[in-house]
Amino acid sequence: MWKTVFLKEMTDSLRDRKTLLLTVLIPLLTMLGLVFFYESMIADPGDKTYTVAINEKLPSDMNDMIKEVKNLKLETFDDPQQAVKDGEANAYLEMPKDAGDMLQHQTSFAIKVHGYPTDDDSVIAVQMLQSLLEQYQNQVVEKRLAQDQIKSSVIHPFEVQSVDVQEGEDGDGENGVTTMLLSILLPMILVTSVISGALPAALDIVAGEKDRKSIEALFLTPASRLQLLIGKWLAVSMFGILSGIVAIGMLLLSTLLFTEKLKQALNFGDQVWSIIGVMFAALIIFSFMVSMIELLLSVVSSSVKEAQSYMSMIITLGVIPMFFTMRAGATQLDTYYFAIPFLNIHALCKQLMFGIVDPMSIALTLGSSALTVMILFVIVRSLFMKEKWMLAK
């Protein structure tokens, strides 16, 4: 009998355009927007040119060094600082008028690089200038040491190099950055898509029937209340699962087809099918848990409007754990991360994105979520059996 209830609820929900909108269209558009946004954050400057404002002639060797960089263009302005403020230049390189003479006489002076910290292009231009000036400073020092017949190793006794232990000495550090970004993006998308996908069905399936006063007629059917609850719960869960699959599938597809940097983090080698299997299992159990929470809120609400006010809390509950896992390394997640509902899905996805398939973490995540589902099911079943909560007021 619960199968009949399940099919009926699925059919009724699919007729609702709002359900299709939140389950399919919004996750698709959200995925595309987020993928392109994250790709733009880590993309190379490419052929983009940044204008550097100056008002004095630079030392010839410094001028030549900056001109060799294809992304930087020097331009003279009467008021360089105002040019940066007006957006005509991305940065302003300020130095004394007699900088060349001061260098020859080995007189120390200050060079100021002006920019807007809230403007991405200005920040990039400032960083590029700072890097170039540091290189130029090292060249000047080495030249002076050579004149005095002093080895550069006297003031540079050693060189500090950063090595990614995951990639090895020849690895690309950018791959770690892209993996870190996807490890934040993936669980956030999974959580929000499941919650939003199951939301319309959960609102209509109990609270909506209370509003329409059709819940009494439903209880007169041959199906028992337990069968009704199971059928409704599975219908809500199915929409959450479908929404999660669409969102994650679109995320992976758009990353592989439309990005250069982000797709580098999706090379899982021989573990790809293990990771997909674990991700799918986590998606299913998480959808069961979320749908049960949403059903609980729908049951205790006397109307759809009241249920909507409660449902907004679930989105917050799903996103907050992201801030706890964001700064923690994939290998530094403690056991309790995988034992707390909502937090565990973020922690597990982070490990999976870094290619870590830990049986203990998987068992804790799925086990704690399954336990939460059982506890919630007992609570909702108890409320579902009482007219005080189920009959329209």
Image: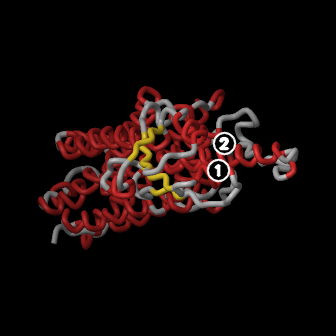
Residue 254 against residue 316 in the figure, above or below: above
Q: Is 176 left or right of 158, judged from the image as shown?
A: left
The percent position of residue 170, horizontal first and vertical second, equals: 73, 32
Task: Using residue 339 as the reference point, say whether residue 295 is left or right of it.
Answer: left
Q: Which residue is mark 2?
A: 356
Q: Amino acid at mark 2?
A: Ile
Q: Residues within 10 Å of mark 1 (few under 14, many from 20)?
A: many
Secondary structure under tag 2 reads: loop
Q: Position of residue 169 (x, y in %)?
A: 76, 36
Looking at the image, which residue is at 22% across and 40% down? 14
Residue at 41% from the left image edge and 66% from the top image edge: 379
Q: Nearer the viewer, residue 323 or 73?
A: 73
Q: CA distance from mark 1 to mark 2?
A: 8 Å
In the picture provided, is 233 more to the left or to the right than 42?
left
Badge 1 vs badge 2, beta-carbon distance below 8 Å: yes
Residue behind mark 1? 330
Residue 197 position within the rendered picture, expressed as x and y whole percent measured from the top left: 32, 47
State the mark number for residue 344.
none
- Amino acid on which disc 1 is placed: Ala
Q: Is residue 181 something one can see in this rendering?
A: yes
Q: Quadrant of the N terminus?
A: top left
